[in-house]
Image (cartoon, rainbow, N blue to C red):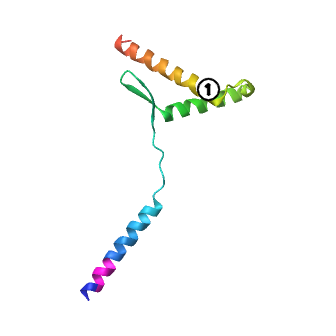
C-alpha cells in the first residue's frame, strides 16, 4: 500500500512540474547596447525612444522623410549617449 502512495505522490509531483514547465512563457532579456562611463543604456531604452520618435514623425506627417531603421537607431543611440554624458557632467558639477 505504501508503494502505491509513493508512486502516486511522485507521479503528482512530476505532473505538476511538467505543467509548470509548459506554462512558462518566454521572456525577453534586456541587453546592454552602450556603456557611458559606468552607466549602461539598455536595448529597451533604445527601443522605447525609437517608438516615440517614429510616432512623433508620423503624427507630424514626416514618415516619408524618416531615415532607415538602421540610421534612425544609430542616431537615437548617439542622442541617448550624449544625454547620458550631459547628465553625468551635470551631476559631477552639482547642477
Q: Residue 48 location in percent, x, y? A: 55, 33
Taking the magenta stretch, the answer to whether it contains residue 46 is no
- Which residue is depicted at the point 58% across and 28% down? 73
* Extreme residue toward the left, this view: 2
* Extreme residue toward the bottom, this view: 1
**Measured along the vertical axis of the image, is residue 89 above or below residue 48?**
above
- Residue 40 sits in which quadrant? top left
Residue under pointer 1: 72
**Measured along the vertical axis of the image, is residue 88 above or below residue 50?**
above
- Residue 53 sits in which quadrant? top right
**Measured along the vertical axis of the image, is residue 64 above or below residue 94?**
below
- Which residue is depicted at the point 63% across and 30% down? 69
Q: Residues within 10 Å of mark 1 (few under 14, many from 20)?
A: some
**18 horizontally vs 45: left or right:** left
Query: Which stretch is magenta?
Result: 4-9
- Which residue is depicted at the point 39% across and 13% down? 89
**53 horizontally vs 7: left or right:** right
Q: Residue 44 location in percent, x, y? A: 50, 35
**91 horizontally vs 3: left or right:** right
Label 1: element kind: helix
Locate the C terminus and report the quarter of the image it occupies. Answer: top left
**Which secondary structure dominates the residues rendered in magenta?**
helix
Q: Residue 1 location in percent, x, y? A: 26, 89
**Measured along the vertical axis of the image, is residue 2 above or below residue 61?**
below
Numbered label tally: 1
Amino acid at each position: 500500500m505504501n508503494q502505491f502512495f509513493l508512486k502516486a505522490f511522485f507521479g503528482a509531483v512530476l505532473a505538476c512540474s511538467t505543467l509548470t514547465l509548459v506554462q512558462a512563457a518566454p521572456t525577453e532579456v534586456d541587453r546592454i547596447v552602450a556603456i557611458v562611463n559606468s552607466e549602461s543604456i539598455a536595448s529597451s531604452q533604445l527601443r522605447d525612444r525609437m517608438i516615440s520618435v517614429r510616432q512623433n514623425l508620423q503624427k507630424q506627417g514626416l514618415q516619408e522623410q524618416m531615415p532607415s531603421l538602421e540610421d534612425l537607431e544609430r542616431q537615437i543611440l548617439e542622442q541617448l549617449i550624449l544625454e547620458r554624458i550631459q547628465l553625468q557632467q551635470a551631476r559631477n558639477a552639482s547642477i
